[in-house]
Image: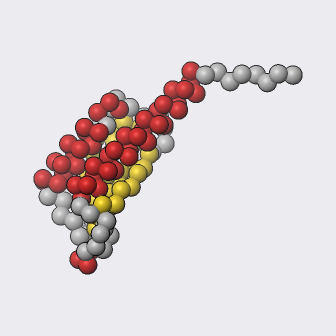
């Protein structure tokens, strides 16, 4: 699973931040790593230099093999909180999508009664 981190002009993508994002995503999606080819992480500061509550945004998009991408967003007061929130949301979304896919593959469609 490849993890790509992108930042806007207000966020410095220094090595410690990239390491934190990588570790958080790897931990949250560990059980799905065989099903996910890539995760794109976009970090932004919604208010720039003005500051504000809940102004750090993390958007994560996972690319499951053979399925459409899954994207989630989390806004929080800090980048670390936004990354954790988005990683948790993404894990739940992937679990839901893969669970539905497994259920539909196991459950054959019953023919309608005449």
Name the residue furthest right: 114
Which sits in the foreground, 62 or 93?
A: 93
Quarter holding the C terminus?
top right
Which sits in the foreground, 67 or 16?
A: 16
> Is 54 on the left or on the right of 102, as rendered?
left
Q: Quadrant of residue 45?
A: bottom left
> Is 97 on the left or on the right of 76, as rendered?
right
Q: Is residue 42 visible?
A: no
Residue 83, given in percent of the width and then of the height, sits at 27, 52
- Residue at 48% across, 37% down: 97
Q: Establish if 3 lies above or below 12.
A: above
Which sits in the foreground, 53 or 74?
A: 53
- Residue at 51% across, 26% down: 102
Residue 36, given in percent of the width and then of the height, sits at 36, 36
Quarter holding the N terminus?
top left
Q: Establish if 104 lies above or below 43.
A: above
Numbered label tally: 0
Q: Quadrant of residue 30?
A: top left
- Residue at 42% across, 50% down: 71
Residue 78, given in percent of the width and then of the height, sits at 23, 61
Q: Quadrant of residue 26?
A: top left
Q: Is residue 73 visible?
A: yes
Residue 39, given in percent of the width and then of the height, sits at 33, 45
> Is 34 on the left or on the right of 24, as rendered?
right
Name the residue furthest bottom: 50
Q: How is the image coloured?
A: secondary structure
């Amino acid at each position: 699973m490849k993890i790509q981190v992108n930042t806007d002009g207000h966020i410095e993508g220094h090595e410690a931040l990239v390491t934190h994002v990588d570790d958080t995503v790897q931990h949250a999606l560990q059980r799905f790593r065989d099903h996910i080819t890539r995760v794109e992480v976009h970090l932004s500061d919604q208010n720039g230099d003005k500051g504000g509550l809940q102004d750090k945004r993390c958007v994560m998009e996972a690319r499951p093999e053979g399925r459409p991408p899954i994207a989630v967003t989390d806004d929080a007061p800090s980048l670390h909180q936004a990354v954790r929130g988005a990683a948790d949301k993404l894990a739940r979304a992937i679990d839901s999508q893969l669970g539905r896919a497994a259920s539909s593959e196991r459950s054959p469609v019953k023919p309608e009664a005449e």
